[in-house]
Every structure is written in structure tokens, then in C-alpha cells.
Amino acid sequence: MNDPNGLRSVGGVLHVTYQYNPYEPRWGRMHWGHAMTQDLVSWTHLPVAVSPGPGADEFGCWSGSLVDDAGVVSLFYTGVRLDGTDRRQSICRAVSVDDALLAWRKDEGNPLVAGPPPDIDPDLFRDPFVWRDGERWAMLVGAGTADGHGTVLLYRSPDLRAWSYVGRILTAEQFDPALGADAPMWECPQLLRLDGVDVLIVSVVDRAPGIRPSHVMAFAGRLADDRFEVADVQQLGMGPDFYAPAATMLPDGRWLLLGWIPEDPPGEGSSRTWAGSLTLPRIVSIGGDGRLSLALANEVLRCRQTRRPHRPADLVDADPWRRRLPDGPVELGVAIEPVDAEEVVVELRDAEHGDPIVRAGYRPADRVLSLARAGIVGVAGRSSMTATTLPEGDGRTVRLRLILDGSILEMETNGHIMATARLPERPSDEPLNVVIASHGGRARLRQVEIWPLDVPAG
């Protein structure tokens, strides 16, 4: 599985569709998988929503979005067909034919948008995001220009069927490459409206040979006069394995975001029968500094079992704090204050051999937070380390919340920064230690809490 395609609450149930190959754990002729939840942590798998068929989507039904028009739910997706060896991408639609969203009918007019405008690479045109904008409907499409720059295109429609091209709302060449927005294509655009601020989210592919997922960017500002006026730019989340997020507003007004954890197919000799996963649910908000904040949804707390608190401790060089973690899914909460330490570190290590699995570090001098995993996993060529600079308003104490479920680690820092890492495969019964250390000086371990987690199947 890969991209979450559309999130939508209908009748108190959150429906999530996603890219899915039902035949094997590798990319292929993609379908739309479908699942639902009432609590954001336990999921029910539903029948496949749409599958490739003759015509515009014969090679695959790629990413898109869901939209509700007075109770009639439509999914907009990227139809892909082959023209010789070239892929041709178009915008297609399917409409729900029952209230439970279990059956879908493809629009007889597909493709509704047969291809990109002339200045867009025909192989870099996908991922429609549709919403009601006043009396009309609007659609964003991720794209790459013919001269090699990521961009987002805007279309408008009176009825969700007849679409008119308006133009580009934003392009990568408008920004200094050092900001992280440079790319041959921007994928999976999303538009959120938070506290009067428009937020445009795009997924950035890198410029290596062959399109590879890299990271996620967010532009805060305002969509006005069919252009996006940018007030702030930031990378959304630390990564390193976080891509193609989709967002929706929940009935209680919170903005929910789910992303994809990318990885290569199982290697030779692997017992793994799956590839790819969705992240834990995040809530997106605007922080006090005007920057976007990502935090785990409170619903994740329901997975906690009996808390195992530990006493505060003083840390000095060469004398780390060490404990064995319980088997199975686990949550670790740590609050650590550097006194005069150059760096404080939290590591998960193989309990038998002491080999590090993952390492989170913080340097107070330059406020750099890093996360590094052992080995190269995920998508070949992706970095095994990521880093960000914490804002000064966070204070000296760093609060980390790490959730480990099998080979996936999610880390929340100070309640507003998220990181996701796909860790190397290891036996499910292999014990782990947590090691917390201070390097180059002293630190105060103010709080350590460990919760075994009861993670619902599915």
C-alpha cells in the first residue's frame, strides 16, 4: 500500500481510501483500498473501492481525494493508461451508490480531464484534490512543468463534471532551493484552512534518476485571485519516512492528517508479506509562533496499558540510564534537561548484542534535534538520518514521546513536531533496551514513563 487517497467522515465514521495492490507486496496496477474507523485506532477493512478497467485507468487508479456533495460522495482519482511505453495520466471520477460507501460507479464521462495543459510534462500530472469553494467546485492537481519544476494546477467546475483549467497557483522555481521545495514534481496537493490561514501541502520528489518520494512541504498564506500568496514555508514533519499525507476536518473541528510510510518490497528471504503502511493519526494546528504543529491524536492514548513510571535521575558522561522495554508495541515518554551537556541521547538497542536500532539526539547549543536509524530501509537511497532545529520557545527541557510498533517508530517532540522511521526488520521476540545518555557534560532526566500498548489488529 502507499498514499492515503481520501479521508472523509460520513455518519460518524471516518472512511480512509489508499493506494493498494491486492496481488502482491509491491507497486503495480494500483487499486483503491478502503477502510473505516470510529475511534482512529481500530480499523475495519472494506471491499476495494475502485479497480483498473478498460479505458482511461487500464494501467491503474492512482491517488486523489474524496468529496461530499449533499450526501453524494465522489472519489476523484488519477486514471493511468499506457501509450506504447509512456504513461498517460488523466483525472477520473467514481460516485458512491450506497450510504455505506461500499459500492462505486465510475463516471461514464471519464476521463473528466483528459490530460495536462501543454506546458506540463504528460507523465507528471496527478493526484486531484477537490473541495467546494463558494458556489463552485475547485480542484488542485500535482504536476511537473516541461522544464523541470514542481507545481500545483488549479481547475474549477460548476458541477464536479465539467472542469476548466485556471492556471498554476504556485511553482517550485519561486523559491530558494535551500528551503527544500525544489523538485521536478509536486505530488498529492492538499489545501487546509486553519484559523483563517490557508495551508497548501505538497509532497516533494527528489531529482535522482527515477521519481522517488523525498519529503513534505507546507506553505502557509492565502489562496486569492487564483494564486497562492505565501507567508511562511516549512518542511512538515521530520521524516525520514513520511510522505503523501492526506487531511480532512473531523466533525469536532480538528484537522486530521494521515501519511504514508514508504518502503521497498520485501527482499529475498524476507518473511514480510506487506510493504508500506499509514502513519498514526496526527492533528494539524497553527502554533503560537504561526508555524504548523503536528501532534499525535489523543485517541492514540486509548492503546495504553498499565503505566510503568521511573524515578528522575542525574546523567553524566559514561553512565547512561538503561532499562529493558516490554515485549510488543510500546510507548516511551522521556523528559530530559541538558544541564551543561553537549548532547543528550535516547537510543533503542538490541538487548542481547547492544547494537543500536534507532537514535534520537538533541544538541542544546544549536537546538538541533536528530533521528537516525540503523541501516538503509524504506525506499532505496533515502537517508537514514533526519534533523530539525527546535524553536527557542520550546525551552531547555526536551520532551520525547516514542511509539514503537513492530518495525515502525513514531516520535513526537515537545507536542508539535513529528518524525516517522521504518526500522530494520528483526524477530518479534528480540528484546530491546532503552538507553538514555548525556555526552560532554551533565543532564537531568526529569521523567521516564513506559506503557505497553494494546494495538488493535488491522
Image (cartoon, grey):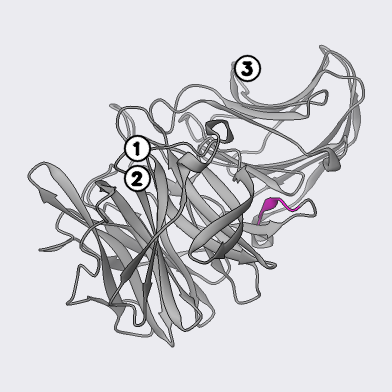
Q: Position of residue 66 (x, y in %)?
A: 40, 70
- Which of the two residues, 206 or 337, is positioned nearer the viewer here? 206
In the rendered image, which quarter is residue 419 located in? top right
Q: Marks 1 and 3, Cα distance to the nearest angstrom?
A: 46 Å
Magenta stretch encompasses residue 295: yes
> Which secondary structure, mark 3?
loop
- The majority secondary structure of the magenta stretch comes to strand
> Which secondary structure, mark 1?
loop
| Amino acid under disc 2 | Gly
> Which secondary structure, mark 2?
strand
Query: Which range of residues does the magenta coloring cover?
Result: 290-296
| Amino acid under disc 3 | Gly
Kindly identify which residue carries mark 1: 148
Q: Is residue 133 above or below residue 40?
A: below
Q: Which residue is rendered at x = 37% and y = 35% of the image?
A: 212
Q: Which mark lies nearer to you, 2 or 3?
A: 2
Q: Which mark is residue 354?
A: 3
| Amino acid under disc 1 | Gly
Q: Are marks 2 and 1 in contact (CB under 8 Å)?
A: yes
Q: Residues within 10 Å of mark 2 (few under 14, many from 20)?
A: many
Q: Position of residue 52 (x, y in %)?
A: 18, 60
Kindly identify which residue carries mark 2: 144
Q: Position of residue 150 (x, y in %)?
A: 41, 44
Q: Are marks 1 and 3 in contact (CB under 8 Å)?
A: no
Q: Marks 2 and 3, Cα distance to the nearest angstrom?
A: 46 Å
Q: Which mark lies nearer to you, 1 or 3?
A: 1
Q: Residues within 10 Å of mark 3 (few under 14, many from 20)?
A: few
Tell me which label, 1 or 3, sits earlier in the chain.
1
